[in-house]
Amino acid sequence: MHARRHAALPLQGWTLLSLRPRGQHGGLRAAAARSGARLLALSTQTIELIGNASARAALRQALKAHVLLFTSPNAVRGAKSMQALSPRRQQRVLAVGSGTRSALGRLGIEAQAPAQMDSEGLLGMPGLVEIAGLRVSVVTGVGGRDLLAPTLRQRGAEVTRADTYRRVPVALAARAQASLAATLATPERVVIALSSAEALAGLLAQLPAGQRHALIRIAVVAASPRLARSAADAGFHRIAIAASARPAALLRAAADAFV
């Protein structure tokens, strides 16, 4: 019975650090609990939806394109907050990953997502290779990598962009910082779920030098090879790459690599 219980809880005794924006830790929290881990929420960002007149006009124009690209569940949520979403006839809808595809699916919109759930994976999809002369719209958030639009323009597409939300930096809560300091006393069983290089940079910027030094001793499970490189550049050494940014995939990769 003990062996079965251990197999069912592969991260028993571990702490998972979630860098998701405020109020968006639920999926990782549930996945951590299923794996036997506790979750420590470390939000240095909050999501602010955009609803001004210029954003609404940009979205209305974007939704007329031949191809719609949604870059995150927050992009879907922000667009939905401005107007009802429904694809036009023969319009293709693509999502950067399965979480974004699910967010669209809950609105009755069928979308395709790449196996490699990032911008590079999206750009490798067959539907975005031969697009010269087509109108393509990127529904996204303010800032970000801005890889999609320049690459699509190089391929001959007419590209528009609609920003539906912005990431707003916030100070790490004092209670969270104290919990992190206590957690880092035993870094061997601590792992960061990394799905945003910006969030990691925001965390490192708010920590005192001693805590930053302690933090890079813990493990990192990255949602993509690009994020794994970001973790390595920040000084981390124990790094694994998950099959996707989905919470279950992140926890599975952490257990396989570090337990």
Image (spheres, helix red, strand yellow):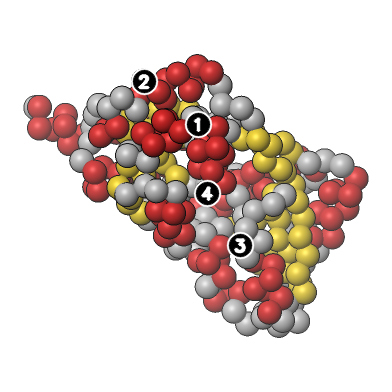
Point out which mark residue 197 bears: 4
Instruction: Decide: is 57 above or below 94.
Output: above
The first of marks 4 and 3 along the sequence is 3
Circle 1 sits in a helix, a strand or a loop, which is it? loop
Instruction: Give the number of the mark in front: 3 or 1.
Output: 1
Residue at figure coordinates x 61%, y 74% from the top left: 128
The kind of residue on which mark 4 rests is Ala
Instruction: Give the number of the mark in front: 4 or 2.
Output: 2
Residue matched to label 1: 207
The kind of residue on which mark 3 rests is Leu
Instruction: Give the number of the mark in front: 3 or 2.
Output: 2
Q: Are marks 1 and 4 in contact (CB under 8 Å)?
A: no
Rounded to the nearest whole Å, what is the CA distance between mark 3 and mark 2?
A: 42 Å
Residue 146 or residue 49, whichever sits in front: 146
The first of marks 4 and 2 along the sequence is 2
Residue 100 or residue 20, whichever sits in front: 20
Residue matched to label 2: 182
Residue matched to label 3: 94
Residue at figure coordinates x 56%, y 58% from the top left: 96
Neighbours of disc 1 within 10 Å: few (<14), some (14-19), many (20+): some
Quarter placement of the C terminus: top left
